[in-house]
Amino acid sequence: MSLADEMFAAAMDWSPFLPSMYGLPGWDDKLEDLSVEGEQALRARIADILRRAETSDEDPVTLAVLRHQGESIVARIDARLVEHTVATGMSAPVNALLQMAAQLDVSQRQDKIARHVDQAAQRVRDSDRRPLLRHLRAGATRMERFLASPVQEWEGTASPEIRAAIARYREVLMSVDGRPDDQPGICWLPEGEQNYANLVRNYTTTSYTPAALHRLGLDLIAGLREEYAEIGSRVWGTSDVLEIFHRLRRELLWDNEDQMVEHAVDAIARAEAVAPQWFGRMPKVGCQVLLVGEAERPTAPIAYYQPAPLDGSRPGTYWLNPLGATERSRTLSEVTAFHEAVPGHHYQLSIAAETEQSNLRRFAFIEAYLEGWGLYTERLADEMGLYSSEEQRLGMLGLDAMRAGRLVVDTGIHAFGWTRQQAVDFLRENTVMTEPEINSEVDRYIEVPGQALAYMVGRLEIQRIRGEAAARLGDRFDVRAFHDLVIGLGPVPLSVLDQEVTARTAASP
């Protein structure tokens, strides 16, 4: 077995739902070992692979991906995130389990679920890294809702044991003394500063410091205000940014859930129609739009993408959560569809999976590349002429502002000791997000330190790399070839993407 295959196996043992999502055999009966002993055994295994990689003759790109994957998992283990990630996001192990169980076949995992939940409970109960009190309560409420629901098909004959473990987990969440809202960041936890620095480095794959990222976010927010004023003056005859924010929050809302799906399907169809002008290679699988199941809606994201399995038994899926649809702005519909589906994650993940590269190269989880591409395609869609109105272009700016705000808020919380309310106030003043969205986003940033930084950092780097390639090649620059190269590499650290594009464009005749 090659070192790349060894690291891939270790990474999938760390996150065994991922191979099941792609239809890769070998993990359908596994759940992550959340125990201290299990995590440390995996850490030692990864450290050994990294040590042997120092003298390996595998190609440099594969080695760079291998190192990133190993170092990222080690950073998460060392930060002991499982001990203070308990709320309703996908990073909270038990909540993620409940959500994935409703979407994947977990029949071979049923007898392991209760132990998995008990491991999560023990880590929280025995830790010196207290979760935020509000997250403990949110997690407990999520467990209560599950326990009050009818038995679901995925529970099978193991339902009594699963529900007993969920009840024990809920009791732990209710009994732990949580941190107050004025101490939400990882900086308030033991080794917090070093752990955050490691997470920032691995999520962004750059040398940016938290202070530099904070300043970058503030500068981007200022620039976006100018774009808001420019479009707002055409749409509503006002350049008053606060007035534009107010109208975006209160007007142009959905009438019903069906509108959300119809609009998303239409946007994706328009993107697919013009994609050949911008991409030389198209994915072999299609993309469907589905609504999140009713039981998962209270804790599922507003929208997300699930890749197709390798056997093509179903298409890629753009999941929409219709919860609170009539209180949400429809201006975010098209930009989100372009990010999550076409030409965003659906093209990116499907085409990478169809390459002949190793599994590590095809399925590596490198957020700065993955989410950077998704955010890059939001602006690419504007170049492609995909936005159907100026209002939808305001939606593009709305998500831009959210991602720029993430740079400020994530670093504010975790590096500079911001209170939760400071983060809420900043997003309220500088984005068009509604109050429920702001609160949900802030809680996500608190529970997943550093992840929110990947989006804008990745987009800016891809744009810079493209700009430099275009300058080198002049009239010979082919945007389709550039996009095929970026996606065809599979997920890589941004520095590697830069090196590969530079080398291949410099060598072009």
Image (cartoon, rainbow, N blue to C red):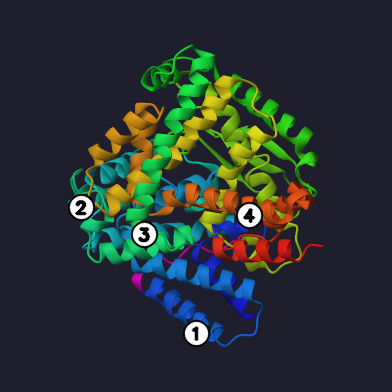
- Tell me the distance, in whole angstroms, between the alpha carbons under discs 4 and 1: 35 Å
Disc tally is 4
Front-most of residues 472 and 500: 472
The circle drawn on residue 176 is 2
The vertical placement of 212 against 274, above or below, is below
Residue underneath mark 1: 51
Does the magenta stretch mainly form a helix, a strand or a loop?
loop
- Tell me the distance, in whole angstroms, between the alpha carbons under discs 3 and 2: 33 Å
The residue mark sitting in front, 1 or 2, is 1
User: Please, what is the three-letter code of the amino acid marked with disc 3?
Assistant: Thr
Residue underneath mark 3: 209
Q: Secondary structure at mark 1?
A: helix
The residue mark sitting in front, 4 or 3, is 4
- Tell me the distance, in whole angstroms, between the alpha carbons under discs 2 and 4: 52 Å
Residue underneath mark 4: 468
Q: Which residues are magenta?
A: 28-36
> In terms of sequence position, does the residue under pointer 3 or pointer 2 come before the other?
2
Q: Is residue 282 magenta?
A: no
User: Please, what is the three-letter code of the amino acid marked with disc 4?
Assistant: Glu
Q: Residue at x 72, y 67 (%)?
A: 357
